Amino acid sequence: YEVSPGSLIRVEKLAAKKGEKVFLDKVLLIKKDEESFIGSPWLAGAKVVAEVTKQDRDRKIIVYKFKRRKNYHRKYGHRQPFTELEIKEIQFKKIPASKIKK
């Protein structure tokens, strides 16, 4: 996801309650002023602090299976659970390349 402080994102359901803070430490890229920092695969020393605003289920989708001439048809619905996060801040502490464990 591309995020900035104050933005809302929907992610797969997390085991966190409403109002709880969540720390996301798998950050791929950060752009600060005119500099860009790219991780390989993740950026060391970077994390996103977010707060859970909602735990809910998405709208229902209908799944319909059908095989012609075989008298076979199945219809069922599915509601995907999700967690809505509000991004509070993006923390980044530049770590020298010599200190990063590979």
Image (cartoon, rainbow, N blue to C red):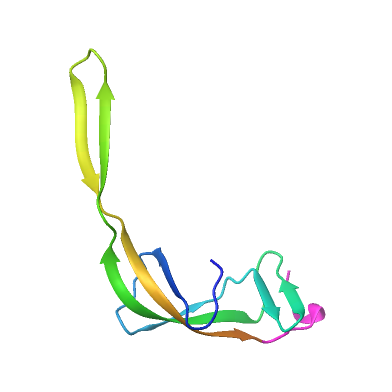
* Residue 48 visible in rendering: yes
* Residue 43 visible in rendering: no
Q: Position of residue 79 (x, y in %)?
A: 26, 54
Question: Quadrant location of residue 95?
Answer: bottom right
Q: Nearer the viewer, residue 14 or 85?
A: 85
Q: Position of residue 9 (x, y in %)?
A: 44, 70
Q: Residue furthest left?
A: 71
Decide whether residue 86 is among the magenta residues.
no
Q: In the image, is 6 to the left or to the right of 33?
A: left
The correct choice, above or below, for 57 with respect to 97 in the image is: above
Magenta span: 93-102
Picture residue at 29% right of the left edge, 59% below the top: 58
Q: How many marks can you see?
A: 0
Q: Residue furthest right?
A: 98
Q: Main secondary structure of the magenta part?
A: loop
- The image quadrant where one finds the C terminus is bottom right
Q: Position of residue 21 (x, y in %)?
A: 41, 84
Question: Quadrant location of residue 51?
Answer: bottom left
Picture residue at 27% right of the left edge, 67% below the top: 56
Q: In the image, is 74 to the left or to the right of 18?
A: left
